[in-house]
Image (spheres, helix red, strand yellow):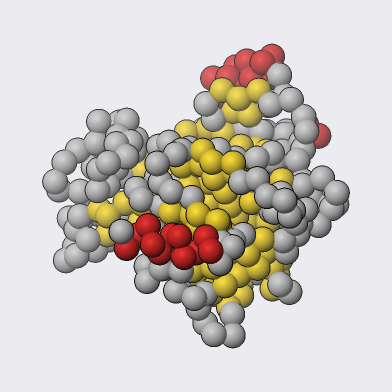
Amino acid sequence: MRARSWLAGLASLGVRTLGTGSNSINCPSKMPKALQKVRTLGHGPLDTPDPFLFCVYHKDNYPAGNSKMEVTERVGNGNDFNPDAEYRMYHGGRVPGFPQHPHRGFETITATLEGLCDHTDSLGNAGRFGDGDLMWMTAGKGIVHGEMFPLVEQEKRNKLRFFQIWINLPKKSKMVEPDFEMQWAEEVKVWQSADEKARVIVWAGEFDGVKSGGTPPKNSWANEKDGNVGVYHISLDNGGVVEIPATKGPKMNRYIYLVEGQTVEVDGTVVKKDSNRVVLCEVDPALPITLKGISSTPSEFLVLEGRPIEEPVAQHGPFVMNSQDEIAKAFQDYQQTKFGGWPWKE
């Protein structure tokens, strides 16, 4: 009764409410509303709008590691993606992560919140980053890399949270030289509300006058004129409010993902998250939208926006091109050249 009365009270104030029984709910309104639809997504990669190809929210609570930064509780089987487990080994054995694998034709953004990632690649680059760092990689004509998650803590659990985001490249840029840009945690820019109840990490683009602390790789779609790529992480405490302005440009896409929290208000609608699955808010990017924390549990969102590339997409595993013939050529090139080979000991 209390829950029903609370929701009824919100409705009497003009606040729309969405229960948790439906996976997809349309949000019609007489007045123009930015929020169009709310969907609870399945496990695995999140739905993404053009120019984005792929997004995964990684959240793992690894056990303490041994002297080799390995797990001691179990060994991965090479394909460990159980969404209900406390942690996943992914394609790793003793060390979780993604051992060497190729890419061609797109870009990756690895945006970390907590935990560490060890990067190695076929160009001879290697390094450890995490705990708020961001790596932006243009695969271009081809690169092989590995991303492993070392368990450096031996006396306590190793927590890991990050987003892996793929952004497409237009046909003219799919065969450019591979490239990297790093944003170290101290360089990453953050917007904060006056009451300190709302916080926006600006990984790409600009939010309310706060520009990203780094520059995307030179051939990135984010560097195209009017590409307007934005990647933001929003945190809201109870009572915290963020207004996301309308996007720039006549043709844009924007998705907003509720990744943490229980109950929030999105564009005047109460949205509830009652599982470990992500809730997608599909919105009209031409309209501003307001997010408000209305729960004692802090909430977190990911926002992806940008001008669509609007080209054919042919994808097979780690290769993204414009045609199946180009995909076949990517496999042939990789088999023949290994995209430069692998200079590291296994």
Residue closest to the eye, 36 or 247? 36
What residue is drawn where x is 37% and y is 57%? 4
Question: Does the image show residue 306?
Answer: no
Question: Is 3 on the left or on the right of 26, as rendered?
Answer: left
Residue 82 spot, x, y in % from top left: 29, 36
Question: Does the image show residue 9?
Answer: yes
Furthest-bottom residue in this view: 194
Residue 84 spot, x, y in % from top left: 27, 41
177 is higher (above) or lower (below) than 133: above
Which quadrant: the N terminus? bottom left
What residue is drawn where x is 70% and y is 41%? 51
241 is higher (above) or lower (below) than 52: below
Q: How many marks?
A: 0
Question: Is 321 on the left or on the right of 73, as rendered?
Answer: right
38 is higher (above) or lower (below) than 207: above
Q: Quadrant of residue 319?
A: top right
What residue is drawn where x is 62% and y is 15%? 328
Q: Quadrant of residue 206?
A: bottom right
96 is higher (above) or lower (below) than 199: above
What residue is drawn where x is 40% and y is 41%? 21
Residue closest to the eye, 242 or 93? 242
Residue 134 spot, x, y in % from top left: 54, 59
Which quadrant: the C terminus? top left
Question: Is 311 on the left or on the right of 214, as rendered?
Answer: right
Residue closest to the eye, 24 or 176? 24
Residue 66 spot, x, y in % from top left: 17, 55
Question: Is 172 on the left or on the right of 60, as rendered?
Answer: right
